Amino acid sequence: MAPKKNDKETIIDSTSKEEKVVVEKKETVAPKKEDTIEIKRSDFDKLMKTLEKQSKDIDLLYKTADKSRMAKELNKEGENLIKQSSVSTWGNTGRLIVGWSDLITNRCEIVMGKWYEDQTLNVIFEDGEVLTVPYLEFARSRTIKLPADVIGRIEEDGELKYKLQFPSGKILIINTKFLN
């Protein structure tokens, strides 16, 4: 009896009733190419415009976001997505404000029909000087914001601080809650 052929090339010996695999068929497979998709040019252009608009929107959101709250959220994930920030200066002096305290005095009362407030706080400058000012002066003072690039993150005493570099080359480490 002649050998039978199946999916695999096999020889069946009719005398012993045993199957023996002699050679498996080899299929030729074309080399894998990268997965590609073909779309219309108009659809591609529309998709690219959408991506560009979203990119601009994301940049705008980063620029206008509350940096302190954003830094806290990013710290949970260990990411540093904030690329730029700004630091306030005190009035026309150009001195950088690196922090301020809660109210030192907070006395508000009505005396003989008039409202009086005595609220003061400390403003901390980059050189370590502390200035005690009335809250109204602090809130109403004209501050200029200087832009800076975020070049690093430091976690110190459970607080997140950013290492900033100003266009002048100056480097400053500041707590995220005092960033603008």
Image: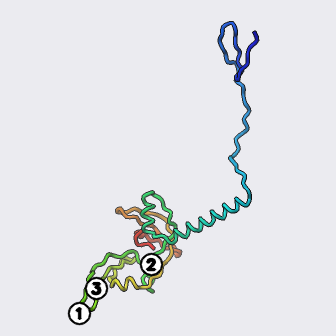
Tell which of 33 and 153 is nearer to you: 33
- Could you say which quadrant of the image residue 115 lies in? bottom left
Give the labeled residue for mark 2. 88
Marks 2/1: CA distance? 39 Å
Q: Element at badge 1?
A: loop
Q: Element at badge 3?
A: strand
Label at residue 118 = 3
| Residue in view at x 63 percent, y 65 percent | 52
| Residue in view at x 40 percent, y 69 percent | 175
Q: Which quadrant is the N terminus positioned in?
A: top right
Tell which of 10 and 175 is nearer to you: 10
Q: Amino acid at mark 3?
A: Asp
| Residue in view at x 43 percent, y 62 percent | 73
- Residue situated furthest front in the rendering: 113
Tell me which label, 2 or 1, sits earlier in the chain: 2
Give the labeled residue for mark 1. 112
- Could you say which quadrant of the image residue 16 lies in? top right
Of labels 2 and 1, the one closer to you: 1
Q: Say few, some or many: other residues with alpha carbon within 10 Å of mark 1 (under 14 / 14 to 19 / 20 or more).
A: few
Residue 91 lies, in percent from the top left, at 43, 85
Residue 70 lies, in percent from the top left, at 45, 65
| Residue in view at x 32 percent, y 75 percent | 102
Marks 3/2: CA distance? 24 Å
Q: Amino acid at mark 1?
A: Met
Q: Which quadrant is the C terminus positioned in?
A: bottom left
Q: Amino acid at mark 2?
A: Ser
- Could you say which quadrant of the image residue 53 lies in? bottom right
